[in-house]
Image (cartoon, grey):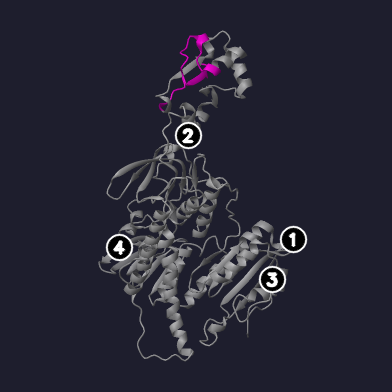
């Protein structure tokens, strides 16, 4: 039986059972055919073991050969594929197609790599692919639907995220600097006021220059750029639809998903009709006036902060806590500073309806909100309502289900392994759409670069998602790296931690006499690991610049002893981390009274 079976598999013909010798797919089954539309164009043979005298013996030999005791048992051109699920998986990952065709007859792919998404991660990946191996052909698609079509190359960060946000934050800081300057002896008679239109135009001009620079860079690297919406229609093949509705089709051996996220709406009457999101704010052609910011994310607080810094009446409506996922002591200090500087907070309320009272630029809106802790209802009028309650992954309408890529149905994000590979081997994903990973531009860039080097440069280096530094650009900036204090207690136990902290007063603020003992710094140390720093937090000016430097040290295993041995630069804000000697557990006063 074994010899006969091996002969059958070798010639894939079944002559001894009077089958045609030229079939490519052989299915051993007991009763009933394993049929599928995906194999309808293939010549398939069925060997029904139930009707053969030596069927049980054949099934036993099959089990010995393949370690598979179930049926159907599928072979393609003599190669064992597996059962029903394995055959479908082989179809989705493209290996079935390779087994079915002679290499000389297989039509070559249009590209070695197609990247769906023209944001920071996708662009970084395409750049490194070119630098690593110029023999590969690759394309970048920027996925566009009715919302995404307004974005240019660079994605959220460049067009409606990090770049315009930081520039508007800077505009607000300059307003504060103008006030401080009088104390430093600057005298000016002219009434100073802010012009929203001039600011927006300057920022959009800069963004436009970045868009153009990215396009030129892609052209120089021979990367095909398609400003189209990409959607999988079969394994290794996508349909690309541009703004005019024109459709083209493209195939590739490998795909990288870098589609990013879009702002989420509330799902209440009037939200999409009358409210805006951060996607709209940075190019808004008129000053938003009295503004309600709905949400307590870093996007919400950053926008509220710079709007207030530009002199606007700003209110933040918070459902529960500020800056979920961040250290809550730091988050509350951020909120307290914003309140001190004129931002109003409505806690434990959510909007339930937005009505337009008057059209205009801006117009007038009435917001009705309900308490999260009772039946209380409040109403208030605003010129603009900005929704910043989170973002949704752009994965549900790009045909992932067609090729079998799994997503987290709750949030639309894509589970991947430690090499950013999805459950379909030829499809990878990077950036904000990854399930359980950080939603930060530099993370997407790093992951895209390293993925390209692994795919085409022979590298084995993987993206490290641990101890990633970040900064919230609120009026008083908050930088962090490592664990929040709550998370550290949960992971290591309070008894195994030592928290060092201090208030500080930037020298630049002493002459204007503002915000004394408002800035705050703390480090969280693991006592059972040589007081290694596992959490770094700073609230103060230029927090991002401070945090970036210490992040490298934390990556290298920074300890409290090493900080103590480091000589600080005087006078700076960062030097407080080299002189910190008061622990939270001591209960000592951390107020600073001098230089």
Q: Nearest the camera: 484 or 53?
A: 53
| Among the two numbered marks 4 and 3 on one chain, the one whose residue lies closer to the N terminus | 4
Disc 2/disc 1 C-alpha distance (Å)? 50 Å
Which residue sits furthest front?
Answer: 135
Q: Label 4: few (<14), some or many (≥20) within 10 Å? A: some
Label 2 vs 1, first from the N-terminus:
2
Other residues around mark 3 within 10 Å, as few (<14) / some (14–19) / many (≥20): some
Disc 2 marks which residue?
94
**Cα–Cα gap, marks 3 and 2:** 53 Å
Rendering quarter of residue 366: bottom left
Residue 563 is tagged as 3
Whole-percent x and y of residue 549?
60, 68
Compared with 263, 175 (above or below) is below
Which image quarter holds the N terminus? top right
Q: Mark 4 points at which residue?
A: 355
Residue 304 in the image, given as x and y percentages of width and height: 43, 70
Label whose residue precedes the other's in the sequence (1 or 3): 1
What is the magenta range? Answer: 9-37
The label on residue 261 is: none
Q: Is residue 336 above or below residue 114?
A: below
- Name the residue tied to disc 1: 528
From mark 1 to mark 3, how far is it between C-alphas? 17 Å
- Give the residue drawn at x 40%, y 44%: 398
- Residue 29 location (% of width, % of height): 52, 18
Q: Distance between the residues labelled 4 and 3?
A: 55 Å
């Amino acid at each position: 039986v074994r010899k006969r079976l091996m002969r059958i598999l070798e010639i894939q013909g079944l002559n001894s059972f009077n089958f045609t010798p030229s079939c490519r797919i052989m299915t051993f089954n007991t009763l009933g055919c394993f049929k599928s539309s995906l194999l309808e164009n293939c010549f398939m043979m069925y060997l029904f073991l139930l009707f053969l005298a030596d069927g049980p013996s054949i099934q036993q030999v099959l089990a010995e050969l393949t370690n598979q005791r179930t049926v159907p048992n599928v072979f393609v051109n003599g190669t064992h594929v597996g059962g029903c699920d394995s055959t479908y998986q082989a179809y989705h990952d493209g290996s079935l197609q390779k087994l079915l065709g002679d290499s000389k007859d297989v039509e070559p792919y249009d590209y070695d790599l197609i990247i769906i998404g023209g944001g920071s991660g996708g662009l970084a990946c395409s750049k490194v692919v070119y630098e690593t191996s110029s023999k590969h052909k690759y394309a970048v698609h920027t996925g566009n639907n009715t919302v995404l079509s307004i974005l240019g190359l660079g994605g959220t960060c460049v067009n409606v995220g990090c770049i315009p946000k930081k520039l508007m934050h800077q505009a607000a800081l300059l307003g504060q600097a103008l006030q401080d300057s009088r104390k430093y002896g600057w005298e000016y008679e002219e009434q100073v006021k802010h012009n929203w239109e001039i600011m927006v135009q300057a920022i959009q001009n800069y963004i436009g220059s970045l868009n153009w620079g990215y396009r030129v860079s892609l052209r120089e690297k021979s990367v095909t750029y398609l400003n189209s919406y990409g959607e999988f229609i079969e394994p290794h093949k996508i349909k690309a639809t541009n703004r005019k509705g024109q459709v083209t089709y493209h195939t590739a051996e490998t795909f990288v998903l870098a589609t990013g996220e879009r702002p989420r709406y509330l799902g209440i009457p009037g939200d999409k009709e009358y409210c805006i999101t951060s996607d709209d704010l940075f190019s808004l052609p008129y000053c938003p006036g009295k503004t309600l910011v709905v949400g307590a994310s870093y996007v919400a607080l950053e926008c509220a902060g710079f709007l207030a810094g530009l002199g606007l009446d700003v209110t933040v409506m918070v459902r529960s806590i500020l800056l979920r996922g961040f250290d809550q002591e730091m988050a509350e200090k951020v909120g307290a500073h914003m309140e001190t500087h004129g931002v109003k907070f409505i806690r434990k309320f959510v909007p339930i309806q937005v009505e337009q009272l008057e059209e205009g630029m801006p117009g007038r809106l009435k917001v009705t909100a309900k308490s999260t802790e009772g039946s209380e209802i409040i109403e208030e009028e605003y010129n603009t309502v900005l929704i910043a309650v989170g973002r949704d992954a752009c994965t549900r309408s790009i045909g992932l289900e067609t090729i079998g890529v799994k997503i987290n149905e709750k949030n639309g994000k894509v589970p991947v392994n430690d090499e950013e590979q999805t459950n379909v081997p030829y499809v990878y994903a990077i950036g904000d759409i990854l399930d359980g990973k950080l939603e930060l531009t530099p993370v997407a860039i790093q992951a895209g670069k390293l993925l390209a080097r692994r795919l085409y440069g022979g590298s084995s280096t993987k993206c490290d998602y641990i101890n990633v530094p970040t900064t919230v650009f609120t009026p008083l900036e908050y930088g962090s790296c490592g664990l929040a204090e709550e998370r550290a207690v949960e992971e290591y136990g309070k008894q195994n931690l030592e928290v060092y902290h201090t208030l500080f007063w930037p020298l630049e603020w002493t002459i204007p006499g503002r915000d004394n003992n408002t800035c705050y710094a703390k480090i969280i140390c693991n006592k059972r690991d040589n007081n290694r720093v596992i959490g770094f937090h700073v609230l103060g000016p230029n927090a991002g610049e401070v945090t970036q430097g210490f992040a490298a040290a934390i990556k290298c295993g920074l300890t409290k002893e090493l900080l103590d041995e480091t000589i600080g630069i005087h006078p700076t804000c960062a030097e407080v981390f080299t002189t910190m000697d008061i622990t939270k557990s001591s209960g000592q006063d951390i107020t600073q009274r001098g230089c």
